[in-house]
Image: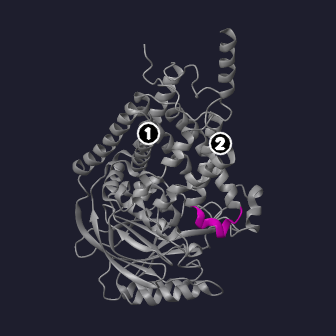
Amino acid sequence: MRNPFGRRGSGAAPTTGTPGAPRTPHRAARAVVAVAAGALPALAFPAPALWWFAYVALVPWLLLLRTAPTARRAGLEGWLGGMGFALAVHQWLMPSLHVFILVVAALLGLLWLPWGWLVRAMLGDGPSGPRAAAAVFVVPSGWLLIELARSWEGLGGPWGLLGASQWQVAPALRLASVGGVWLVSLLVVAVNTAVALLVVSDAAVRMAALVGLVVCALTVGVVWWGVAPPREQGTARIAVVQPGVYDGPGGAERRFARGEELTRELVGQDLDLVVWGESSVGSDLTARPDLAARLTALSRDVDAPVLVNVDARRSDRPGIFKSSVLIGPDGPTGDRYDKMRLVPFGEYIPARPVLGWVTSVGKAANEDRRRGTEPVVMALPAEDGRPALRIGPLVCFESAFPDMSRRLTRDGADVLVAQSATSTFQDSWAPAQHASLAALRAAESGRPMVHATLTGISTAYGPDGSRIGTPLGTDRSASAVYDVPLSRSTTGYVRYGDWPLYVALTVLAVLCAAEGMGALRRPGSELRAPRARTARGSRGRRER
């Protein structure tokens, strides 16, 4: 019986020294190309924001891995490409981590090492049509598991998930409402895989690749026409206050004073909520009743609660916390959320006894921040017969985690609010990338999201992920008011969660089962160790 995943001859690049065969590129040249190819997808994210480029950005890397002379080499080039990707999407960290960013990138790059093996196994050595069709599902599944591993906070969190590059593409946002950013990443990598097959293969494989592209297009079409956007039910009038950069001695007090000034300009705007950015208050309000009184007076003046963020040592608990605190016209309401997921090296140093030396070469945290224990949904006062507006606060980096906004939505949040500060990275791509994440979280949850920062970019998105009004850029010290559409619709992602991840796991499990049953295991298969294959081939020649 013919193997359904059988190969149709060898299309892989011959190794150097094969009689009559062209020489492969020098190993050093291939290594440089691998790093550069891995970095290409970063151009799809803000600030370049070439969203369309995401659908072909992986093709050079895929073609390089496909022609790797051995599985070991494919793994190495997967690692090098992963290093390039990690460096490119985290390049804004260089001023803080300096040379240590190379160590971080090298460690993260290891996640792509098995992906290099997988790509070569599925695309290399002249794949048949059925195998090419399988590759359109298998290769994206492998990529998605890398994104899942990277989403662990200890590895830096889900920054630079490939699907997040599509934050301003309406059909992609609709996909996110069904399967989160994970489903968008699957689609993007599937298109890249199909395009790579179109470039290198024969007619049967090209037909399989075209079928894969059609399936991707049909998936988008079915979701676009079959899944209704969130139904809007009323609006909330929310203001953000962005004081701008205030560094140096006395910066916290001057920033607070500027926040007061901007908030008073909002008097008479009929607001439901005023949001200040991350670390907008530099002292514990219990220890500084004068600051609490000033904020209370502001809430009374604008006739709306003020959500501030306190970055200070607590008087009632040991350690420094970053906390969202709601202030009403009668003072702090008692609603408080302590940040749960901290930025590695920025807010704590993993394994500080071992890695504490990082503080001497960069701007890593000198003292670890303390973690909160649970998410909090805060209820604003009901007015004019309207039910209380419920807000779900997130602090900075937490807006990158799909599961956190999903949890807040399931807990009853009507509006998601992210309080952020990126002044350290003011002149990099970081502020734009960070602000774009709110679009994905809004689309996934079917809830509007407000992104308020100290120094920009502050913005807001509707429940379908579309931008509301004009954002405040990094050159602004100003306030802005957004009329935010509300919705009580339940998205597929909120209802079913991270199901694309389970699909990816299933696809790879089926692949492993097929290999175990011999469907993929055969003489000459690159899934075997190269040394064993060479020995087997040599023995066969001796026997003949």
Q: Is residue 318 visible?
A: no
Question: Up-down: is 368 above or below 217?
Answer: below
Whole-percent x and y of residue 369? 63, 65
> Mark 1 Cα within 10 Å, few/some/many (few <14, many 20+)?
many
Q: Is residue 226 left or right of residue 202?
A: left
Whole-percent x and y of residue 342? 58, 61
CB-based contact (under 8 Å), mark 1 and mark 2: no
Q: Is residue 157 left or right of residue 215?
A: right
Question: Up-down: is 290 above or below 408?
Answer: below
The segment highlighted magenta reads 90-99
Q: Is residue 188 left or right of residue 246?
A: left
Q: Looking at the rendered structure, which numbered label has been put on residue 76?
A: 2
Whole-percent x and y of residue 253? 58, 87
Whether residue 98 is in magenta: the answer is: yes
The residue that appears at 41% across and 49% down in the rendered structure is 188
Give the prevailing secondary structure in the magenta stretch: helix
Which sits in the foreground, 274 or 231? Answer: 231
Residue type, label 1: Leu
Residue type, label 2: Leu
Q: Quadrant of the N terminus?
A: top left
